[in-house]
Amino acid sequence: MTTSRIREDVAGLIATRTPGRSLEGDLYVSPEALDLDLDAIFYRSWIFVAVEPDLPEAGDYVTVSVGRYSVIITRDDDEEIRAFHNVCRHRGSRLLDDKCGSIGNIVCPYHQWTYDQQGHLLHAESTPPGFDRSLFSLRKVNLRNVSGLIFVCLSDDPPEDFDEFASRVTPYLAPHRLPTTKIAHQIDIVENGNWKLVMENNRECTHCGGHPELLCSLFPVYGYQESDIGPRLRPAWDRYLAAKAEFEGICARNGLPWAAIEELDTRRTGFRIEREPLDMAGESFTIDGTLASRKLLADFTEPRLGRLSMHLQPNAWFHFLSDHIVTFSVLPLTADSSLLRTTWLVAADAVEGVDYDVDKLTYVWQQTNDQDRAFVARAHAGVGNPAYVPGPYLPPEYQVEAFCNWYVQRVREIL
Amino acid sequence: MTTSRIREDVAGLIATRTPGRSLEGDLYVSPEALDLDLDAIFYRSWIFVAVEPDLPEAGDYVTVSVGRYSVIITRDDDEEIRAFHNVCRHRGSRLLDDKCGSIGNIVCPYHQWTYDQQGHLLHAESTPPGFDRSLFSLRKVNLRNVSGLIFVCLSDDPPEDFDEFASRVTPYLAPHRLPTTKIAHQIDIVENGNWKLVMENNRECTHCGGHPELLCSLFPVYGYQESDIGPRLRPAWDRYLAAKAEFEGICARNGLPWAAIEELDTRRTGFRIEREPLDMAGESFTIDGTLASRKLLADFTEPRLGRLSMHLQPNAWFHFLSDHIVTFSVLPLTADSSLLRTTWLVAADAVEGVDYDVDKLTYVWQQTNDQDRAFVARAHAGVGNPAYVPGPYLPPEYQVEAFCNWYVQRVREIL
Amino acid sequence: MTTSRIREDVAGLIATRTPGRSLEGDLYVSPEALDLDLDAIFYRSWIFVAVEPDLPEAGDYVTVSVGRYSVIITRDDDEEIRAFHNVCRHRGSRLLDDKCGSIGNIVCPYHQWTYDQQGHLLHAESTPPGFDRSLFSLRKVNLRNVSGLIFVCLSDDPPEDFDEFASRVTPYLAPHRLPTTKIAHQIDIVENGNWKLVMENNRECTHCGGHPELLCSLFPVYGYQESDIGPRLRPAWDRYLAAKAEFEGICARNGLPWAAIEELDTRRTGFRIEREPLDMAGESFTIDGTLASRKLLADFTEPRLGRLSMHLQPNAWFHFLSDHIVTFSVLPLTADSSLLRTTWLVAADAVEGVDYDVDKLTYVWQQTNDQDRAFVARAHAGVGNPAYVPGPYLPPEYQVEAFCNWYVQRVREIL
């Protein structure tokens, strides 16, 4: 129930935004801005919410909350994945409570209205003469499946460029055969900061000195150009250039595209994708860069496939490696808190304790997530201070700037 | 401090209400709608807050919160029951903190302003010359006592039809002699849902399949007509009709009125009252329908007096039986939570452990309350989803519709 | 993001204020009024936040939150005390988390922007060509040090009468040599009431019957005139007059000013200062009035110096005694809660366990704070009741009235 008055206040903050600078503080901390973000971003964009292996069997479902919405994603007996609003058409009761499970028909626990897997109302008791069940099907939610990544869009008018995005990234993603993997581990953490700060933090590596475990395998020059490199980063930069020269040959031999596509703020479904080498052994996100799972994905035979990294507006990033995939989704809870879900996927036939160890597989990103959580909380505390004035994004932070550009465009579209 | 802007938004939701359908979601979940509900309903209607046995002795008091108000209800030395605002006339300190207790004069703990049982200011220190104590009496709250049920009205202009309501229901209630009973048990539970959903849930039995303990004695056809009965309910319906035929004779022999009066949405003080038979042994709300207390109330000699049930807008329902009385009051805490108080009363001379056992007496409604709490939480979670659209009330839910009609009328009166 | 609409509502409550009466309830309990209070009072007045002994050594710092601001107060290597906003000029990260500590340069933990003790940006990595570091110094906060009491003003246009206030009170305060003391104990308690109720409670002694420990040494006639004294207070009043007659001689012999200056609501920096005798042994705030620390402050030789008490709008009060100093600051947390910080200071060379015992030193005010916390919670609960109507301040409450007058003037200035 955001009044037009409050919307005007937020609109003023958007209007005064200076390109190249961080956003006004109230856009990060005010509940009114969150309402606007939900409306402008999360209720209109394609949102990454799950992976196919979240629903391995027919009848499996997951529920996911996006702002005030709750969505059911099911795999029906014909293996088709569908999405419905988690609301009974009778008097609005929530249908499914659990985060995931397995069902046949969907039966509302309140008055037993019963829906089939396609959402049709099969049964309702004590209906009056002439009651037309066909008017009370579950409301569908738009869904797309891109190489096993599940996206929903809560708007009836979803962004039209998504299919073109999908066709561009599929040659990069498909070789890893995500639908044939299984979930090795999944964790949800709550970050004490606005969702935009979680995203901004992910879009630059100028804070990577705070991630010692990650830097064993990740070159800390992500986002940098030659001209940005100072004495501290020179050795890593030289190592990165050498690794990259060899890496392109590996990719070519394995028939894998690697070149960066970067359309972060120039389209509705902003994204960036690139395959890049890793440091040390060059195989995976581990302390020495060697494999985290001995079973390679798909039909890969070469472990040194680096990281295929995709960043997607507004709420996700992904790393596809030779031995595992790790996905990240960010969902706002309040203006001040956000849910980060991290999912690690390995080959379906990899055996825990034999081919991989969950602690080793997840160690680097669990540490990195914890460190980022502290950075985000610190950033949120600061921008809520009225003494904060938007500051400059430096050259290696250009992707943060691109995120803000994309965000401001989306908000302006609805104001 | 509800601004007129926000009130316009809520007014819009009220204006678009479709008869026969549940209310718009924001009327259930928004804090602004709760402010309006308090103003339109709880600060203007007669609200059931206590029973005479809450104050058995002269000097006893109870305090009750209704929205932002706190009210003191006292029984003075002349046995008159009175109500005052729980606010000192000096600088506004709360006077009494406890839920109940016993007092002589009311002495403010802050600066010792002292009031007698009629609310007159008896003493205040260091007052200036000419200070007129008579201007600083405690502010009175309107109070009515209907056969031992205590109602307050926070408005200076209480609904005028209340006395007529009282005269209509007194012949039903008085024979149970509530003022001669004692409280055997009283519990407060917090439901995670809007107060209207708590009331709506109570106004229909189409969810009664979720109340196995209650259905041992309650016929699950409350609110149903012959035409609403499907195969599932046919056996219960037939049993109900047979019981009812015999029951009217019992009532007649005992001089007790039983016919339904139903004026739920056609008057300011909407209500419904009817005496109906119980299932099984037909005596009380127990697992086998036998008495929960061996001491019958009043001068009853017949245990099979069924349930005299009264439903009252906006916040109460009651069951009067031959051996006990159970009362229910609902008070909003926040838009998202409500306080349900349940009170069990037995004959004053019934001896705990001899004539009745508290666990047995309270078992059925404690279970039922818990089950309803889950239903209400589920309903609240659902209607807060923007994908919720108001759905149809079915014929056996006509009393839910009547509640909504009554509610919408009250809100429209003040908009 | 207080909208003009809401500000109009609060303005209405201010406009209808009746002199001589307590404030309208929503001025105490509504979040909108708190926003206004922060803007009108806490972001524009000189606010007492620390004492010099909070920062005994060069490099020491404390952080303090005032509303949504966080301020760093540091003592640099040249012993100068400075204040900065606790916000990095890069992307707004909070710089320092701890309540106090010791530092050299201030290094932001997020991206290592490094500031010197004067707030200049010394270092930032990957800046573009032409980046002018001098534009990104830490933002300064106005600071004043009055005989060791540290005040900050968050406005760029601080009240101009502060220096004149300082010159008036310095002859009273300076002889106690606060900068040469040390902190013996400091406690923060959260009061469940609006900050104005905490202040009002402190501005009168008509509730002092609730402070039995304090009344061992404090005459319960603070704020009273002869004409306000009733039979209950007559013995204390007579004792007070006798003590005062002797006390003025002691002050004169020790060269200490004692006469009251009272400009509570007649100036921007409203204050009251007076040196008054204590009851019993007359030396300190203890159960028998004897010293709490055997080491007298400064070069005092006479223990019976009474209490030099200063009250300051909007948020502080102080008692300077011969053997210790106790300071109090009140900061709003929410409309419903406030932080009270109490600091006890003793001579720097007093030895704990030998010259003073912390439990004995702090006993009286710990008890008194606890009692006041209950009074404030009770008052807050009461004024939030819509049945509350502003009541009369009595003659011995004239300083409460002065506080409200001062408050209303400040709010009117910005409306």
Image (tube, coloured by chain):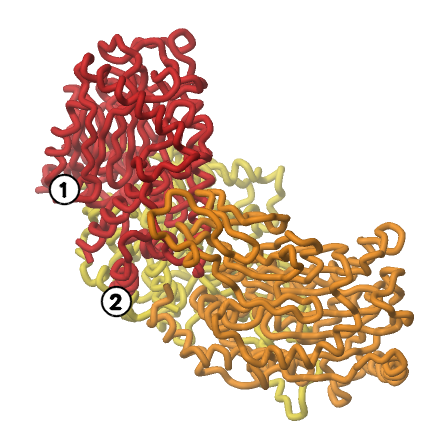
Chain colours: A red, B yellow, C orange
- Asked if A220 appears above or below B374 in the picture, the reply is above
Q: How many marks?
A: 2
Residue at the image position 41 percent from the left and 58 percent from the top: C135
* Contact (Cβ within 8 Å) of mark 2 with mark 1: no
Query: Which numbered disc, 2 or 1, marks the residue closer to the eye?
Result: 1
Q: Quadrant of the C terminus of chain B?
A: bottom left
C368 or C111, which lies in front?
A: C111
Q: Report crowding for label 2: few under 14, some 14 to 19, many 20 or more residues within 10 A (C-alpha).
A: few
In the image: residue A376, left or right of residue A43 = right
One can see residue B93 in this view: no
Dot 1: element: loop
A187 or C233, which lies in front?
A: A187
Q: Amino acid at mark 1?
A: Pro
Residue at the image position 56 percent from the left and 50 percent from the top: B183
Q: Amino acid at mark 2?
A: Glu
Dot label at residue A158: 1
Residue at the image position 68 percent from the left and 55 percent from the top: C187
Dot 2: element: helix
Q: Return the residue at label 2.
A: B8
Badge 2 and badge 1 in a common chain: no
Q: Quadrant of the N terminus of chain B?
A: bottom left
User: At which x and y percent is residue A361?
Assistant: 40, 18
In the image: residue C68, left or right of residue C328 = left
C-alpha distance separating marks 2 and 1:
31 Å
